[in-house]
Image (cartoon, helix red, strand yellow):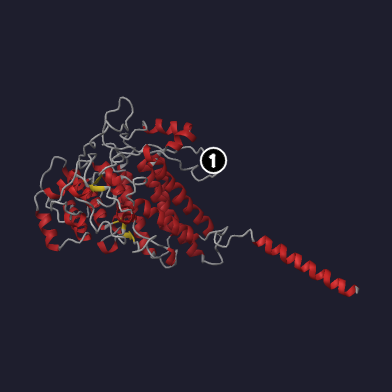
């Protein structure tokens, strides 16, 4: 009897222990793990970065409107620079800090712990890629707002981080970019198939980094010419050198992995965007062969744009083409055309002497036309057009020539076009109709002008006011017409 009781007691104890173990396991969510791999974090950051840069969603990305490629048909607040109505600055800011930079930072921390799964060289490469996209993201923030949090940006316990001066941040991230380039081992793996952008090609990642360095160097051409020349000279022969090397994010045909432009224009079923009169008039005036590729004809069978800010019937004007709104349309981060435009400008500024500025300009224009599917004969005819030909004198000199053509080339890369336009000051855009009479984005006493920056997020003004006030004082004011540190001419 005692033996039977002992067996029962042991069995009961084992059952109790087993139940405790099973109950405890309920605290673990198998589809929401406590730890996330570095490759998952990197993939998420990469997708978020491409999506926000490609987007046409008025809640996130309005640069096609502000560059006057497109305008809105009925709801025109964003065309008219109403940033606060949809908390646009808050969303842009949060996407970069929360969904991109933070994920990349965590990816590097996690990669350091993955020594069993990956070699030291592979981990080093992963960290280098995280750094490159982090530099890209901070570059975007300081060219959007000016001074932003940097040294205290990622401390989750600090809800009031200080703002660092934009030029200081630029110096820090260019050093980080050089270090990342030096750390890449092209003979080792990076993120492999989890690299949604370049498929694990480390040589292409080096090209991405050097193309970013080229862009960053030319950004500071007016304020730090010696730094600009050093960066450009180092990068020039290592950047994209043909359309075959264009660096683009590839989307898929079916949701949820489609291009955000398709989601905004087609899946939504809305007809919110049409071409602007300034852009259509420019393309028509140059007999530009990209026009029928970029836009549709209106109901009258012609290409027609509306004055930015005026209401419009969708059918009466040209809309974005099927090429633009294809679900599989790629988002381009860097292109051969961009690199050649930058080189043409670098030659004019005396930063490079490897070729004539006209040849680089011609290369850039040709690359853009071919990228959009124009024929070789169309390219030849276009470059022969006196209005396009680099040797034809214009009042604004090389800045006007390069500025107009790069404005056209960046027509589906809103933010890149926005930065290029601010640097070169061409084309000369007018403020949209209805600004500031209907929506007033200006402070009292400010002269209305075209937008050249985003104002700081409303949340920052409320939660981090002391540091916000210091940043405003540092950059000049928190107006949309306040030129940023690199935009001095």
Task: Mark yes or no: residue 1 visible.
Answer: yes
Is any part of residue 317 visible from this angle?
no
Residue 355 in percent (x, y) is at 20, 55
Q: Is residue 142 above or below residue 374?
A: above
Estimate the x, y position of residue 209 in percent, counting from the top left: 36, 56
Toward the top, the furthest residue is 445
* Badge count: 1
Quadrant in the picture for residue 132: bottom left
Res. 31 image quadrant: bottom right
Residue 38 x/y as whole percent: 50, 60
Other residues around mark 1 within 10 Å, as few (<14) / some (14–19) / many (≥20): few
**Residue sitting nearer the eye, 351 or 245:** 245
* Nearer the observer, 45 or 253: 253
Q: Is residue 365 left or right of residue 269?
A: left
Residue nearest the observer in this picture, 338 or 74: 74
The quadrant of the image that shows the N terminus is bottom right
Is the C terminus in the top left, top right, bottom left or bottom right quadrant?
top left
What x and y, as percent, mark residue 475? Answer: 37, 33
Q: Is residue 422 left or right of residue 8?
A: left
Q: Which residue is at 28% across, 38% downward?
A: 80
Q: Which residue is mark 1?
A: 158
User: Who's the residue at 50% across and 56% down the image?
Assistant: 108
Q: Give the left or right position of residue 428, taking residue 469 as reference.
A: left
Tag 1 secondary structure: loop
């Amino acid at each position: 009897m005692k033996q039977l009781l002992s067996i029962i007691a042991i069995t009961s104890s084992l059952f109790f222990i087993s139940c405790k173990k099973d109950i405890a396991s309920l605290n673990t969510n198998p589809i929401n793990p406590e730890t996330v791999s570095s490759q998952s974090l990197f993939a998420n950051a990469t997708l978020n970065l491409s999506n926000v840069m490609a987007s046409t969603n008025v809640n996130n990305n309005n640069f096609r409107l502000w560059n006057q490629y497109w305008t809105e048909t009925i709801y025109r607040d964003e065309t008219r620079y109403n940033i606060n109505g949809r908390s646009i600055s808050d969303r842009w800011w949060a996407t970069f800090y929360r969904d991109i930079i933070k994920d990349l930072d965590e990816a590097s921390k996690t990669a350091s712990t993955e020594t069993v799964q990956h070699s030291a060289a592979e981990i080093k490469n992963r960290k280098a890629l995280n750094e490159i996209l982090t530099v890209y993201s901070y570059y975007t923030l300081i060219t959007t707002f000016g001074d932003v949090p940097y040294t205290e940006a990622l401390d989750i316990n600090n809800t009031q981080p200080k703002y660092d001066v934009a030029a200081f941040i630029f110096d820090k991230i260019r050093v980080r970019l050089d270090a990342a380039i030096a750390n890449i081992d092209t003979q080792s793996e990076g993120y492999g198939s989890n690299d949604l952008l370049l498929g694990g090609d480390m040589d292409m990642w080096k090209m991405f980094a050097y193309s970013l360095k080229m862009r960053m160097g030319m950004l500071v051409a007016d304020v730090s010419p010696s730094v600009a020349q050093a960066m450009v000279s180092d990068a020039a022969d290592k950047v994209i050198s043909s359309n075959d090397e264009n660096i683009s994010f590839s989307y898929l045909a079916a949701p949820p992995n489609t291009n955000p432009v398709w989601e905004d224009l087609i899946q939504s079923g809305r007809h919110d965007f049409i071409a602007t009169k300034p852009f259509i008039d420019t393309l028509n005036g140059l007999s530009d062969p990209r026009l029928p590729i970029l836009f549709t004809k209106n109901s009258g069978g012609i290409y027609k744009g509306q004055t930015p800010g005026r209401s419009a019937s969708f059918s009466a004007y040209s809309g974005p083409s099927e090429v633009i709104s294809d679900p599989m349309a790629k988002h381009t981060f860097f292109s051969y055309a961009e690199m050649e435009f930058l080189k043409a400008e670098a030659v004019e500024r005396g930063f490079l002497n490897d070729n004539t500025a006209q040849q680089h300009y011609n290369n850039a224009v040709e690359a853009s036309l071919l990228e959009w599917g124009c024929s070789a004969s169309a390219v030849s005819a276009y470059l022969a057009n006196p209005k396009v030909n680099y040797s034809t004198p214009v009042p604004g000199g090389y800045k006007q020539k390069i500025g107009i053509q790069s404005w056209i080339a960046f027509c589906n890369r809103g933010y890149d076009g926005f930065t290029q336009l601010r640097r070169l000051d061409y084309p000369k855009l007018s403020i949209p109709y209805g600004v500031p009479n209907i929506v007033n984005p200006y402070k009292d006493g400010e002269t209305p002008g075209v937008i050249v920056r985003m104002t700081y997020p409303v949340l920052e003004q409320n939660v981090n006011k002391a540091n916000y006030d210091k940043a405003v004082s540092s950059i000049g004011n928190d107006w949309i017409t306040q030129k940023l540190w690199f935009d001095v001419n």
